[in-house]
Every structure is written in C-alpha cells, then in structure tokens.
C-alpha cells in the first residue's frame, strides 16, 4: 500500500512527518532518529536492530511507499514503537520531548480531522494559464544555527559536567574504571575512524601526567 503524509510537526527544530496508514499515525525512521540526535547510518541500523529483538516491536513497524516521495519502501514506526525506542534512550533530550508530545496525544489519529475533499471543475471551465515566465535566481540567504549542531554541543557540555560531577565524589577504584572505559572508547574510535588530532592530544595528556618531565 501507499501511505500518505497528513501533517507535519516540529520538535527541537526537526520537522516530523505524520503518516497515516492502517488506521494509525506513523513516523519515519529518519525523522525519529534525527530527533533523537543520531546522524550516522550505522548508529541508526544498530539502534533499530537492537530494539527489533523485543516483542514490543511486533506489528508496530511496517515498510510502505510514501506517496509523492522516491517510491522506495520506507520503514515506519507507530506510537507504541516510538515510545519503546524513546524509553530506551530516555537520557536524550529528543526522547524526552517525543514522549511528552505522544503523552499529550501527538500521535492520536482521532485528534486530526480527515483532509477535506477538493472540488474539481469540469475541463471546459478551466482557464488555461499562460506559460511561466523566467524568474531570475536569487542570492541565497545565510541559514541560521544548525539545530542538530546545537543539540550535539549541548550533549557534549552535559557529558563534560557529568564526568566532572562524578569525579568529585568517586574514589580510587571508580576513577580507574572510568579512566579505562574512556581509554577503551578512544581506542575504538581511533580504530574505526582515525583522528590524528585526537591521537596527538591523547599522547600529550599521557606525557603530561605520567611521563618523567611532564607538567604535573
């Protein structure tokens, strides 16, 4: 079947398309995961496959063709599936906002009236329009701040403050565990996506704190 976009809403600067199919409203994979702050295709696939193992996903995820789009099947999530994924990522601002919106009836199909029927005129009564005239190209206006970048910076700031708060109260063993976990994440990042700047900065920190002649 072909699903239809019936309305759009904006959450955290992300435009969500509400799609009607099988008597329910749905969100696309792209819209859902962008609102949660995910950007890479690998992250999206990993999160979906992890959630797909749970029974909560049965009959709540479908693949259909969206009318007016590329014609390729699109994966859709209904209210139950969206809530389940948000609960798994409740620490993200986008998940909190999505759950608040759903609890307020955001995906309740009864609150959206059906689209009115459009009356069409007989062919003989339609006046033909003149051919379109050339419109000169306009200079692009600079865009405002990227909402996804703003969200990323906010998450980074929260992570920094969270680590500082934890270190304020933890003891030696807990510091060792946290240090090992962060070192492991850096190793994984450098193996999957080599960053010369990160590698150099990490060595500089090690030299500063643990090598003879360092600054600490």
Image: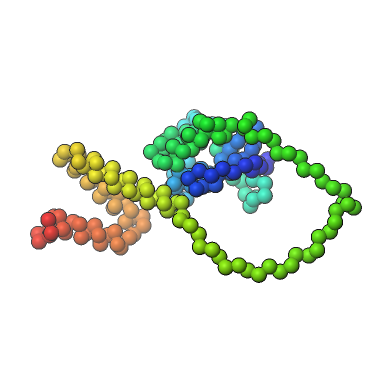
Can you see residue 63?
Answer: no
Residue 209 lies, in percent from the top left, at: 15, 55
Q: Is residue 165 left or right of residue 5?
A: left
Q: Position of residue 22 (x, y in %)?
A: 65, 34
Looking at the rendering, which quadrant does residue 115 occupy? top right
Please name the residue shown 76% across and 40% down the image: 117
Q: Is residue 106 visible?
A: yes
Where is residue 79 shown, x and y percent of the image? 54, 33
Instruction: Give 20 or 74, whichever is nearer the viewer.
Output: 20
**Closer to the camera, 12 or 59?**
12
Is 94 on the left or on the right of 18, as rendered? left
Q: Tell me the residue at 46%/38% (across/down).
A: 97
Left-right relation of 88 to 73: left
In the displayed structure, would residue 103 be above or below residue 199? above
Where in the figure is residue 27, as x and y percent of width and height?
56, 40
- Of the pair 6 and 129, the residue shown nearer to us: 129
Total marks shown come to 0
User: Residue 36's quadrant in the figure?
Assistant: top left
* Position of the N terminus by quadrant: top right
Q: Nearer the viewer, residue 11 or 205?
A: 11
Colour logic: rainbow
Q: Is residue 205 above or below residue 114?
A: below
Q: Image point 66% across, 70% down: which residue?
A: 136
Which image quadrant: the C terminus? bottom left
Residue 68 vertical position relative to residue 83 in the rendered view, above or below: below
Q: What residue occupies the far right of the structure in this picture? A: 124
Residue under the point 40% across and 41% down:
92
């Amino acid at each position: 079947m072909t699903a239809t976009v019936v309305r759009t809403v904006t959450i955290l600067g992300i435009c969500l398309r509400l799609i009607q199919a099988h008597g329910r409203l749905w969100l696309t994979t792209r819209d859902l995961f962008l609102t949660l702050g995910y950007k890479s295709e690998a992250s999206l696939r990993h999160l979906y496959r992890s959630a797909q193992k749970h029974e909560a996903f049965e009959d709540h995820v479908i693949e259909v063709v969206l009318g007016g789009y590329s014609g390729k099947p699109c994966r859709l999530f209904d209210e139950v599936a969206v809530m389940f994924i948000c609960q798994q990522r409740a620490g993200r601002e986008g998940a909190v906002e999505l759950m608040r919106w759903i609890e307020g009836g955001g995906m309740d199909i009864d609150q959206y009236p059906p689209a009115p029927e459009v009356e069409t005129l007989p062919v003989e009564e339609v006046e033909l329009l003149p051919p379109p005239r050339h419109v000169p190209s306009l200079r692009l206006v600079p865009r405002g701040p990227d909402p996804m970048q703003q969200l990323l910076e906010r998450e980074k700031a929260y992570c920094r403050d969270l680590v500082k708060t934890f270190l304020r109260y933890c003891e030696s063993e807990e510091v060792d565990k946290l240090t090992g976990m962060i070192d492991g994440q850096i190793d994984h990042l450098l193996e999957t996506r080599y960053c010369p700047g990160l590698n150099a900065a990490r060595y500089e920190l090690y030299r500063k704190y643990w090598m003879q002649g360092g600054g600490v």
